[in-house]
Amino acid sequence: MSFASDVDKFVKKTEKRIEHAHRYAATKLINDVIDDTPQDSGYATANWRSGVGSAPAGPVDRTSVAEAKAEALMAIAAWPMGARLEFANYAPYIFSLEFGDSKHRPAGMVRRNIKAFDRNVKRAAKRGA
């Protein structure tokens, strides 16, 4: 083997590890935020929207958490390195849930999971592809 082929193998392996970490961390973050969203009717939890470049506009009339997670997984699967993955919630009271109206999650669901994001990226990078 030549030095050039060794470097090429290293680059390809590293790119795979980066992409794995990229997708794993996004999947974990989004699933954790959805799971941590306080549920009453299920509307806020099911209204997490995901997309590449921009989140789909507006709220949806659904109460299925599985649909919100499936939408997120489809967006993550289509998410190329370097592009923006958007994640939004259009429930009119989502801000109140994040900042204190919920006794179930007084620390919010987004803020607490963002704090774990770096740890999840490092964990995924160690695992590799």
Image (cartoon, rainbow, N blue to C red):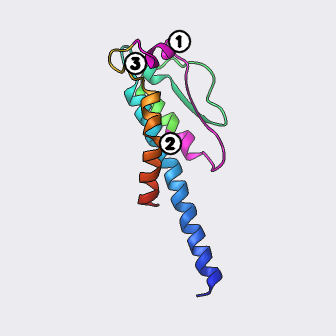
Q: Is residue 128 above or below residue 90?
A: below
Which is closer to the viewer, label 2 or label 3?
2
Chain-order first, disc 2 or disc 1: 2
Whole-angstrom CA distance, mark 2 to mark 3, is 22 Å
Q: Is residue 89 magenta?
A: yes
**Quarter residue 97 falls in:** top left
Residue at 40% in and 34% down: 32
Disc with the residue nearer the chain's start (2 vs 3): 2
> Is 123 situated above or below 57?
below
Crowding at dot 2, Cα within 10 Å, few <14 / some 14-19 / many 20+, comes out as many
Q: Amino acid at mark 1?
A: Pro
Q: Are marks 2 and 1 in contact (CB under 8 Å)?
A: no
Q: Are marks 2 and 3 in contact (CB under 8 Å)?
A: no
Callout 2 secondary element:
helix
Look at mark 3 in the image and give the residue it sits on: 42
Q: Nearer the viewer, residue 116 or 50?
A: 116
Mark seen at residue 26: 2
Q: Amino acid at mark 2?
A: Ala
Residue receiving disc 1: 92
Residue 120: where, in percent of width, then height? Answer: 43, 46
Residues at marks 2 and 1, CA–CA distance in whole angstroms: 24 Å
Q: Residue at x 55, y 46 (%)?
A: 77
Pick the quarter of the image with the N terminus: bottom right
**Residue pictured at 45% horizontal, 36% vertical:** 115
Residue at the farthest left position: 104
The stretch in magenta equals 73-101
* Callout 1 secondary element: loop
